[in-house]
Image (cartoon, helix red, strand yellow):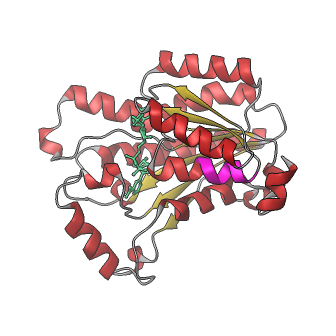
Amino acid sequence: MGTIERRNGMYPELAGKHALVTGATRGFGKAIALNLARQGVKVIVNFRRSMVEAAEVVEEIKGFGGEAIAIRADVGKLPSLEKLFNRITEEWGQLEIVVANAAFGVPGNMMDATPKYWDVTMSASARSLLDMSKLAVPLMTNNYGRIISITSDGGQKVLPGYGIVGAAKAALESVTRGLAYELGPKGIVVNGVLAGLADTKSSRSIPGAIDVMGHAKFHTPLGRIVEPKDIAKVVAFLASEQADMICGHFITVDGGRNIVG
Ligand SMILES: NC(=O)c1ccc[n+]([C@@H]2O[C@H](COP(=O)([O-])OP(=O)(O)OC[C@H]3O[C@@H](n4cnc5c(N)ncnc54)[C@H](OP(=O)(O)O)[C@@H]3O)[C@@H](O)[C@H]2O)c1
């Protein structure tokens, strides 16, 4: 553990803490898991289907001396989450950090969404934050608690082709604020990251993704679209003691795209 502290040293207070990162097989989740592990955090690399990729992330973490365990769970299904938390209880008996990163959504028009698709999207992308928080709080016994959600512009704006994921993100943001209010008095700090567009598997599935990315890059003052490591850095900051007094907020990480009309 000391090796990792010396290697990175950005947030030494995080060394030895325990984190669950949902959807940590690729994209933002993978970068978040790797960066927390570099701070000396022991990480649950959650996956739903991508078992091989999850094992690879665990190996990468172990490769630099970190600790990680891959555990399958569909965050949209409460019984699956309960099994995940039973396993965390068996393995560690405590948890200080939850990063609600996984989201599910099928690109398309809102008018085409079926009730079933609404339910699956809402469960995986929004209700999961509430379900996980209920399960995590009893494990946050170490006088330290951080819950961090990941949202997008789609929670507040219409993103063509984003379907009802935007509605799920709006719900996720509201749950984040509600949890911040209810858990703040317990010393648990709840915040989120509002991420700009990045080139990941999920964003590539949105119709016209390549053109949208080119457009976003052109209109971004910092000259490029977001990369997963940009999000991972801010998640680690929110997980750290540096963010002690930030409560119920979303930090926008988009290279300035949002300030341009
Ligand atoms: N990419 C962007 O431009 C962008 C912008 C703003 C916000 N975001 C948000 O950032 C988060 C990560 O996005 P990403 O682009 O990194 O996605 P991604 O590369 O497609 O990765 C999605 C991850 O979520 C997992 N996952 C999906 N459904 C799951 C479920 N029901 N239970 C557990 N795991 C599940 C996937 O694992 P399996 O393969 O095992 O299913 C995978 O690890 C999402 O909340 C997304 O809405 C993304």
Q: Position of residue 127 (x, y in %)?
A: 45, 32
Q: Position of residue 204 (x, y in %)?
A: 27, 55
Ligand 1 visible in quadrant:
top left
- In the displayed image of the protein, which residue is found farthest to the front? 63
- Residue 55 position by quadrant: top right
> In the visual, does 184 lie left or right of 204?
right
Residue 15 seen in the current view: yes
- Residue 141 position by quadrant: top right
Answer above or below: position of 24 versus 191.
above
Q: Magenta segment, which residues?
A: 33-39
Answer above or below: position of 82 versus 252.
above
Q: Is residue 73 magenta?
A: no
> In the visual, does 182 lie left or right of 213?
right
- For image coordinates 56% across by 18% down, the residue present is 82
Main SS of residues in magenta: helix
Q: Position of residue 49 (x, y in %)?
A: 40, 29
Q: Is residue 35 magenta?
A: yes
